[in-house]
Image (spheres, rainbow, N blue to C red):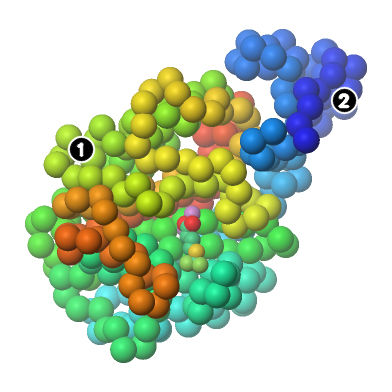
Amino acid sequence: MARRLSRNEPCWCGSGRKYKHCHLSKDLETLGHPREVGVLPNGVIIKTAEQVAGIRRASRLTRDILDMLEGRIGPGISTGQIDRWVYEYTIAHGGRPAPLHYRGFPKSVCTSINEVVCHGIPDDERILRKGDILNVDVTSIVDGYYGDASRMFLIGEVSEEARKLVEVTKQCLERAIAVVRPGARLGDIGHAIQSHAEAHGYSVVRAFVGHGVGVRFHEPPDVYHYGHPGTGLVLQPNMVFTIEPMINAGGYEVRILGDGWTAVTVDGSLSAQWEHTLLVTEDGVEILTGGGKR
Ligand code: MF3
Ligand code: CO
Ligand code: CO
């Protein structure tokens, strides 16, 4: 369980000084109370410096895997091939792919094409064609810590409609990241996404959410991609979670195919998604899966 750090304990920052002589007054200013350590009553984990360091390493591997794929994905490549590249690169760099055998998922990565919203299963028979839009969702485990991110790939030349959906969805994620700082609330994140998507006539998928991440694949809190500003969980330093909006060109309803995983739009409209793992820092946000080629 979480507790508030007491005044005479060593400061959380590792300075070796007492909390009251170090970060206490700054924490009172930004949070209104002494910093919490451990697990909040709602299950949200305030990460230690050691956990953050581990999650940063896993997140960098996830980002490097997506960078590696940038140079390789194109028309004529199968999603089964992408799965093998992800598996081999992950193992070669000391990690494990989190999706493999997670709740029975059969592959190392999710590949979601066109009207597939998320959790598409890689398949040697599915060859990428010019005009497809593809989401590749990578989660790596390094030393027991998790980093989770996804990007869109345009296969050859795509329609103007598809390109715009992918671009606006990326903007939704960027707008959401821009509001993350101590004292901001989860509803601020949802609102930043929903208002932008709906202004373009798109809809926000409700059936899947972002999530706490780091010591497990999926932890509290649920991070909704829609909502009202000033509502929901108040963000604190050393929370780690994903934001991963799924935006549909048509309605937001999804259904799951017979394989038990693949989520598609009910109306057959295109869907796009971008995802990062984020750390709430003392004065803002660090994109743990960022800093690569995109
Ligand atoms: N990476 C996905 C997410 O962003 C979860 C995939 S679960 C899997 O949360 F089993 F399909 F891999
Ligand atoms: Co993911
Ligand atoms: Co995720």
Q: Quadrant of residue 5?
A: top right
Position of residue 246 in the picture relative to residue 215 (left or right): left
* Identity of the residue drawn at 64% across and 36% down: 42
Tags 1 and 2 in contact by the CB under 8 Å rule?
no
Relative image position of residue 138 (x, y in whole percent): 48, 64
User: Gap between marks 1 and 2, in whole Å?
Assistant: 47 Å
Give me the residue at 27% from left, 76% from top. Answer: 74
Query: In the drawing, what numbered circle is on residue 10?
Result: 2
Q: Nearer the viewer, residue 111 or 65?
A: 111
- How packed mark 2 is, by other alpha carbons closer than 10 Å (few <14, some 14-19, many 20 or more), is some
Q: Residue at x 55, y 75 (%)?
A: 104
Is residue 181 among the parts visible in the rendering?
no
Residue 233 shows up from this direction: yes
Q: Quadrant of the N terminus?
A: top right
- Is 61 in front, or is 231? 231
Query: In the picture shown, does residue 42 fall above or below 268?
Result: above
Earlier residue among tags 1 and 2: 2
The residue to which callout 1 is attached is 198
Q: Is residue 44 left or right of residue 8?
A: left
Q: Residue furthest bottom?
A: 125
Identify residue type, mark 1: Glu
Residue lying furthest right: 8
Q: How far from the left and from the top, in percent, is residue 62?
A: 53, 61
Q: Position of residue 238 (x, y in %)?
A: 64, 35
SS class, disc 2: loop
